[in-house]
Amino acid sequence: MAFPARTMMRRLALASAVVPLLQGVALAEDMPAGMGQPSPWQMGLQGAASLTMEYSVWFHTYVMWFIVPITLFVLGLLGYIAYRFNSKANPVPSKTTHNTLIEVVWTVAPIVILVFIAIPSFKLLYMQQIIPAFDMTLKATGNQWNWDYEYPDNGGVSFTSAILDEAKRKPDQPRLLTVDNEVVVPVNKKIRVQVTGSDVIHAFTVPSFGIKIDAIPGRLNETWFKATKTGMFYGQCSELCGKDHAFMPIAVRVVSDQEFAAWVETAKKKYATNPANSYASAGAAAQ
């Protein structure tokens, strides 16, 4: 016996309303635990620590309100057709080949849906691609298999950051994400990130900041972020770059302006033997 069309539509509407709600609850519950790094059994995206990531999370949830009902509708329609119009239940098939109303609906409806998705996506693309007036620059160079960082606006501080040896890792430090030298940036400052590669293609990714950009040898790509929260935020190389691709983490510590200024002074002494720093110091002295 076939399900009444009205009953089926009610069930689909209920399901389409409940699934996004459950997903939103799971996302809200996991965001605090997943701030800056993934957490066990986490669903959804990492917690947002920048305006770009906040909008990305909103856009993700917004699009799910389209995806889930469409998926459930198509699934229900396929099930209904398989049940109602199989050879046993419907031995004499219909000879209908065209239906003007249905053809108009399935042409216009996807266009309308795509327009509703496209409009906010343009704003997200603008936020990600257009770099505003920035407060400082951070340059990241991907190597096999570590990162070189430079602070051209802060005395030319530069250092190499590699995954921390497992024997030195503390219990409260995340596995495969902790590094020996962390990137330090001030909170609520617009940071321009210049990214390149020295050997093969890498990718600089920090999920909580909503940034992901390829590090390509011979090319200088740019992205930006403005961290709105202090704390530790982790990322990884997101481009297959060789046998140690999985051991190329990114660790960013966001601190206050005063803490950042103190760190810069300490870093100038700590990394003074770095060749890049020596070059920057020599250039400054020549001027």
Image (tube, grey):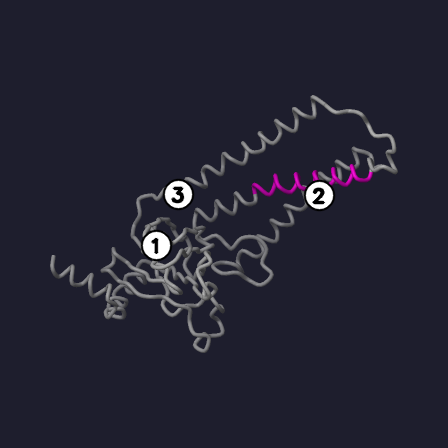
What is the magenta segment's predominant secondary structure? helix
For marks 2 and 1, give the one nearer the viewer. 1
| Numbered tag placed on residue 67 in the rendering | none
Q: Which quadrant of the view contains residue 101? A: top right
Would residue 52 be found to the left or right of residue 185 on screen?
Answer: right
Residue 268 visible somewhere in the drawing: yes
Residue under label 1: 217
Q: Which of pointers 3 and 1 lies earlier in the amino acid sequence?
A: 3
For marks 2 and 3, give the one nearer the viewer. 3
Would residue 218 be found to the left or right of residue 81 on screen?
Answer: left
Crowd class of label 1 (few under 14; some 14 to 19; many from 20; radius 10 Å) = some
For marks 3 and 1, give the one nearer the viewer. 1
Q: Residue furthest left?
A: 286
Which quadrant is home to the N terminus? top right
Residue under label 2: 15
Residue under label 3: 129
Vertical side of 22 occupied by 109: above or below: above
Vertical side of 219 occupied by 82: above or below: above
SS at circle 2: helix
Residue 80 is situated, as x and y percent measured from the top left of the image, at 78, 38
Residue 208 is situated, as x and y percent measured from the top left of the image, at 46, 54
Q: Is residue 30 magenta?
A: no
- The front one of 258 and 16 is 16
Which quadrant is home to the C terminus? bottom left
Please report the bounds of the magenta region as a residue range. 62-83
Q: Amino acid at mark 2?
A: Ala
SS at circle 3: helix
